[in-house]
Amino acid sequence: MVWRRKIGIFPWHLNQDLQLLQSGESFFNELLLRIEKAQFEIYFQVYIFENDHTGFLIYNALLDASKRGVKIFLYLDAFGSNNFPSHWEKELKKQGISIEFFSRFKFAFKYHVGVRLHHKIMVFDGQIALIGGINISDNYSQLGNEKPWLDFGLRMEGNVVKDLLKICLQTENGLMPLSKLDKQKIQYSFLTGEIKARILQNHWSRAKFGISRQYRQSIRKAQEQIVIITSYFVPSPALKRLLKLASKRGVKVKLVLGGKSDVGIVKHASQFFYADLLKSGVEIWEWEPTVLHAKLAFVDRNWMCMGSYNLNHLSDFSSTECNIEIIDQTFQQNSLKQVNSILEKDAKQINELDYIKRQSWLKQIRNFVAYRMLAFSLKLLFYFQKRS
């Protein structure tokens, strides 16, 4: 198992209490409850911590926890959280909260450079954790003026929490080894359970590509069905080929993508693949009410994977990502049923003939140019970014 850990695949555990949470009240009520009930320490790592109603709510909850003696370690991505107010940072530090920003280096004082901290991990007292794709922003809660973006998180207990804690500690320590105190925090319990699950990592600069590997392995081995709900879908040629081959050998392949996007060029780049995938028998659906930000996959009747990983070069090569891989028929089927009940109301299937008829040569050129531009930029490990 040592080599697997090195490439970002943690051991299997059998003692999980897992609960799928949706963006909006479901996730944020649970998050606030966990912060309120924390007794000793909180590790909180997230890509976006916005200066809005949701951010202010979580900021105050963390302050309250700190005032009652909870140690808090807050680690934010410098690019995704560049709107985090400086006076919030000062007040958190004043209350004894450790707050750091990942990859803060800028080029020409404007553009960020380097790998991004994209995972979303919250660990409470080393016993309960939340992961997924949900950031701290009105876009994901119901505190804004519009419906929240569609996304999911997962609440868990058991030894998988220890692996998430280890990731948090390793991220904060950088290249330095864990201290003796840190290692003492990662003590596995001898517990029994029914749901088989493990943590996966992507961190290209450290040669960790566990999520990418397990996605491709599961698609390659699929026999009945593949359901992928994903945002920012810009697959590599190898991944697109795997999906087409699965469809051609009789596997029902269903992709649920965003009808709306907060990044317009990504939507056009995704549409570059539509015609080819549709001709191969792949079903494509678009979620229309809000921005789709979810990252879930279901294969056959028992495999499930979810977290922060997107199917594009950015998640493969330029971001730190964290997912949970689950093998359990009951949990997978219940989760898929829960997700389908949401999608069947507002997701629209793309008809192959209608889509091809609507695609003028100008649109085809636009999609091709968008894909080529995006694919080139996302392949760069060190890239220049300016967030508006």
Image: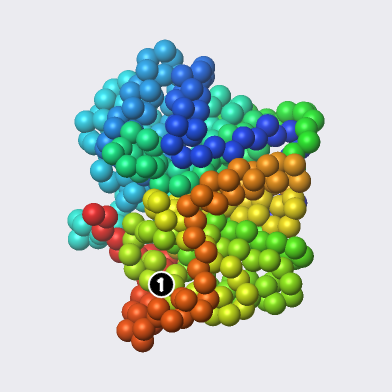
**Quarter that holds the C terminus:** bottom left
Please tell me which residue is depicted at 34% across the width and 57% down the height of the picture: 262
Please tell me which residue is depicted at 68% across the width and 66% down the height of the picture: 252
The answer to which image quadrant residue 272 occupies is bottom left
Indicate the amino acid at tag 1: Ala
Q: Answer with left or right where residue 150 lies relative to residue 360.
A: right
Other residues around mark 1 within 10 Å, as few (<14) / some (14–19) / many (≥20)? many
The answer to which image quadrant residue 207 occupies is bottom right
Judging depth in this view, the residue of 26 and 205 nearest the camera is 26
Please tell me which residue is depicted at 43% across the width and 36% down the height of the picture: 24
Q: Position of residue 317 (x, y in %)?
A: 49, 64
Q: Position of residue 311 (x, y in %)?
A: 52, 63
155 over 171 or under it: above or below: above
Q: Position of residue 386 (x, y in %)?
A: 26, 58
Residue ID for mark 1: 269
Please tell me which residue is depicted at 20% across the width and 56% down the height of the picture: 109
Judging depth in this view, the residue of 70 and 151 nearest the camera is 151
Dot 1 lies on which element? helix
263 over 103 or under it: above or below: below
